Amino acid sequence: MRALRLAERLLEAMVAFLLFALVAMVFTNVMMRFFFNSGIVVTEELSRIALSILILTGAVLALIQQRHIAMTLVVDRLPEPAKKAVVALTGTVMLYGNFLLAQGAWMQAKLNFSSNYQISGLPSATIYVAATLAGTALALVVAGRMVLILSGRMPADKFFQAASADIAE
């Protein structure tokens, strides 16, 4: 659990840094266009890359912190063995989706390693590598929770816990 807490803190720091970088780039460009009728061209590409990485990082962080929206109306009424079956089914579908994300992003990354963004010169594969890492991290979190729940070390309700559960408490 210590490694998960450390990863969570690192992801939070990364999200904060990326948000700050985006605000700084946009603010600087707005001020430069307003006062000097020019802007920093490279920020167009950098902000697109930063926003993409921010979204992927935020998705992983939200899954770790169980901040995704969940519809638990039916699952809440099921007995524990049925909840475990739903965890197995739902988790398998989620793992498959994460596998597709990671595999597809890696295929795109391999295709784009040889090309660069025109202005910044960064590899075009940057976003796809981040998506590959995000898909892998998402799969690890889901698989870890599935193992804990199916082995009986965590209640099945924890798999479906979402942001709304925190609000209700």
Image (cartoon, grey):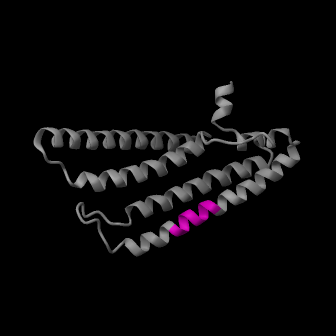
On screen, 126 above or below 67?
Answer: below
**Is 157 contained in the magenta span?**
no
On screen, 163 above or below 152?
Answer: above
Q: Does the magenta stretch mainly form a helix, a strand or a loop? A: helix
Percent of width and height locating residue 7? 51, 45
Question: Along the line of sight, which residue is nearer the eye, 32 or 75?
Answer: 32
Percent of width and height locating residue 126? 38, 62
Q: Is residue 115 left or right of residue 8?
A: left
Q: Is residue 91 left or right of residue 24?
A: right
Q: Is residue 80 left or right of residue 30?
A: right
The number of discs equals: 0
Q: Is residue 25 left or right of residue 148?
A: left
Q: Residue at x 41, y 44 (%)?
A: 14
Q: Residue at x 29, y 56 (%)?
A: 45
Q: Which residues are magenta?
A: 97-104
Question: Along the line of sight, which residue is nearer the eye, 157 or 167?
Answer: 167
Percent of width and height locating residue 164? 66, 33
Percent of width and height locating residue 97? 63, 61
Residue furthest out toward the left: 36
In which quadrant of the rendered image does the C terminus lie?
top right
In which quadrant of the rendered image does the N terminus lie?
top right
Q: Residue at x 32, y 66 (%)?
A: 123
Q: Residue at x 62, y 40 (%)?
A: 66
Q: Quadrant of residue 159 in the image?
A: top right
Q: Quadrant of residue 67 in the image?
A: top right
Residue furthest out toward the top: 169
